[in-house]
Image (spheres, rainbow, N blue to C red):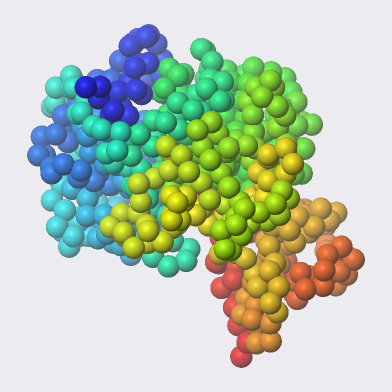
Amino acid sequence: MNNANLFCALRAAFFARPDAAAIETDNGLTYSWRDLDRATAMLANLLGSLQLPAGSRVAAHTDKSVEALMLYLATLRAGLVYLPLNTAYQQAELAYFIGDAQPGVIVCSSRNLPWVRELAAQAGVSHVFTLDDNRCGTLLDQAARMDDEHEPVARDADDLAAILYTSGTTGRSKGAMLTHGNLLSNALTLKDYWDWQPGDVLIHALPIFHVHGLFVASHGALLNGSKMLWLSKFDPGAVVERLPRATVFMGVPTLYVRLLGEPGLTRKACASMRLFVSGSAPLLIETFRDWQERTGHTLLERYGMSETVMLASNPCRSSDGSRIGGTVGKPLPGVKIRVVSDGGAPMPTGEVGHIEVQGPNVFKGYWRMPEKTAEEFTADGWFKTGDVGRFDEHGHLTIVGRSKDLIISGGYNIYPAEVESYLNDTEGVAESAVVGVPHADFGEGVIAFVVPRPGVALDEAGLLARLKRQIANYKVPKRIFFADELPRNAMGKVQKNVLRGLHERLFVK
């Protein structure tokens, strides 16, 4: 029987050119494909020596490093379940994840060991290792004593490979259970749809505790046998410096905005580049156009989430169509997407509704939350994404926002993205965010936060007057507040819950 362990597919490229460079770091280190195979074998043997129960979780709260990526691969190789944790999480947050996931192993940075060890003891976790971004730590010390050969543990496609906790902006964070089959099907689909080529080189500047950096970027390069130019953290100058030696870059919209601020970002610098992918947060049409004009490249926008990995994408090959700014393209091969009403009826083309999906990439469910899992799937087996959007006449999907961000004011439904689009089109506005806060008369009142362009003085009354000429009055914000920047999480998504909290008592006593 074939081993469906995802690691086996990722490892296949290791043997084509074992001594070639697989990863080149920003501090001058080079790892060959043979190095990756040997190191992951030693780490997998260490994990195996702990004699953990089948399906045990390995929690990683570590800074980005090649060794942290190796830990992920070794966890797959050992047949265990990887649990990546955002490095920004503090003690109280980590206590929840450790208590909920009950990992068999925790790997953390040395600086956090005292309080992580305390949490581990409280949760009954007996194996705690350290791993720092300078190739030091007890994890590597103990792995160094292990054999450098290891046969990947047999796994079925339906066995768990990873658990990713959702952001938890509303209520308790949920652990999305992704299987070996989920992740491999998506990686193979993207390898073809994004036209990965022999000789492609990826600039890896994303964190690796999230779908985009850990799965989409890393899997793509590993599966294709592509070299990675590895940045421990995003640095726009470092990215621009590496562009002439690369062909693929993946980033969130914030990264592209910062890159546009680099004088060295020119068409000449991007001459060898084949593909720029944007995702994890909405991309402003202005950024889309500015990038096109500045570099000669058209950003490829795509749509995915922790529970499903990638769902839809603009085309890579010109033969598959054009990339349309403001849309996330069409459903990926093998993925089904539908837009439905509150009652589940299909919405007509151009009409906004709830996005539901099906496919081999859709997760197994939420960790130890069977009731929540059942609630998030329809009777006919479609996953309710919680996003709202619409299809155009050509089948391109536009994401309008999250259903939880929907504002109901005076009985009218208001989609923040629509109001934001008008604000963002206003001269002098860099970006905006629209939220609803409690209102004594209307239930919710619409308010907006606007970031002016540098050196531009904007006037609240003027912006409101302009909006009243463009959209229905019930959609016009009751107040506009100005800010130097919008609060964002590590993947660049605007934290609207933070914005709501700033003025939640604005219209109520």
Q: Quadrant of residue 21?
A: top left
The residue lying furthest to the bottom in this view is: 509
Left or right: where 126 falls relative to 277: left
- Residue at 30% from the left image edge and 23% from the top image edge: 8
Residue 445 is at least partly visible in this image: no
Number of numbered labels in the structure image: 0
State the quadrant of the C terminus. Answer: bottom right
- Residue at 72% from the left image edge and 44% from the top image edge: 392
State the quadrant of the N terminus. Answer: top left
Image coords of residue 505 (percent x, y): 60, 82
Q: Quadrant of residue 478?
A: bottom right
Eyeballing the image, is 56 above or below 123? above
The one of 406 and 456 positioned closer to us in this rendering? 406
- Residue at 57% from the left image edge and 29% from the top image edge: 249
Left or right: where 40 falls relative to 404: left
Image coords of residue 418 (percent x, y): 73, 58
Residue 434 is at least partly visible in this image: yes
Left or right: where 48 falls relative to 90: left
Eyeballing the image, is 289 above or below 5? below
Image coords of residue 113 (percent x, y): 25, 52
